Amino acid sequence: MKEKRFEKGLVQVYTGNGKGKTSAALGLALRALGRGLKVYMIQFLKGGFDYGELHTTKHLPNFQLRSFGSGRFITEKPPKKEDVEFAKEALDFAERIINDSEYDIVILDEINVALDLQLLAVEDLVRLIKNKPKHVELVFTGRNAHSEIIGLADLVTEMKEIKHPFSKGMRPRKGIEY
C-alpha cells in the first residue's frame, strides 16, 4: 500500500565523528519502506567497496541503491581529478533522481565527506536543497557537515564518539562497520 506523499519533505543531516550515520539513514529507509514509500540511496565515495547494505537492499521493494567512487579511501586535498569526476557524476545522478519526483526519500550517503574533501562545491548542494521538489525528503550523511548545509537543514543529528573499539586496535567487522 502506497502512503500519501509528504506534504513537505524535509532536509535531514546525520553527521559527527561517531558511528551510525549511514545506519541511521538505512533505519529511516526501512521505516519508510514499511509505509509503502519509495527510497533511493546514492552513495558518494563508496563505489568499489563491499558494504553489507549492497547485499540486502537489492531485495527490498521500492528501494534502490547506487554507489559511486574509485574503490579507495580518499584523504588528499586537493583531490585527484578522477575522484572529483566520480563525485560530480554522483551529484548529477542525484539531481536527476530527486527531480524525477518518483522517490519520496533520497539519501545522499557520505555527501558531507565529499564536500569536506572538496570533491563538490557547497553552492551545488545549496542549489540541490533549494530546488528539490516539495514532497521529497533529502538525507545527507557523513562527518564534517558544512555549516551552510546545517543551516538549511530541518533536522541535524550529530553522532558523537564516546568510545570505539578501533581505538584499541580492533579492525572493522563485516556486518557491523561495513
Image: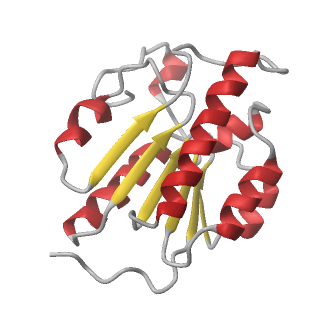
| Quarter of the image where one finds residue 144 | top right
| Quarter of the image where one finds residue 67 | top left
Instruction: Say if 69 sits above or below 98 in the image.
Output: above
Q: Is residue 106 visible from the viewing direction of this image?
A: yes
Q: Is residue 159 visible from the viewing direction of this image?
A: no
Q: Residue 74, image x and y in percent?
A: 66, 19
Along the viewing direction, whichever of 7 and 73 lies nearer the viewer: 7
Quadrant containing the N terminus in the rendered view = bottom left
Would residue 119 be found to the left or right of residue 94 on screen?
right
Q: How many marks?
A: 0
- In the picture as drawn, the residue positioned furthest to the bottom comes out as 7
Would residue 164 be found to the left or right of residue 160 on screen?
left
Q: Residue 146, image x and y in percent?
A: 77, 50
Instruction: Say if 54 sits above or below 138 in the image.
Output: above
User: Which residue corresponds to the image point at 51% horizontal and 15% vertical from the top-left?
Assistant: 71
| Quarter of the image where one finds residue 167 | top right
Quadrant containing the C terminus in the rendered view = top left
Instruction: Say if 96 sits above or below 121 in the image.
Output: below
Q: Residue 168, image x and y in percent?
A: 50, 17
Would residue 60 be found to the left or right of residue 126 on screen?
left
Q: Residue 132, image x and y in percent?
A: 61, 68
Instruction: Say if 106 sits above or below 108 in the image.
Output: below
User: Which residue corresponds to the image point at 75% horizontal and 38% vertical from the top-left?
Assistant: 120
User: Which residue corresponds to the image point at 59% horizontal and 17% vertical from the top-left?
Assistant: 73
Along the viewing direction, whichever of 148 and 136 lies nearer the viewer: 136
User: Which residue corresponds to the image point at 55% horizontal and 23% vertical from the top-left?
Assistant: 69
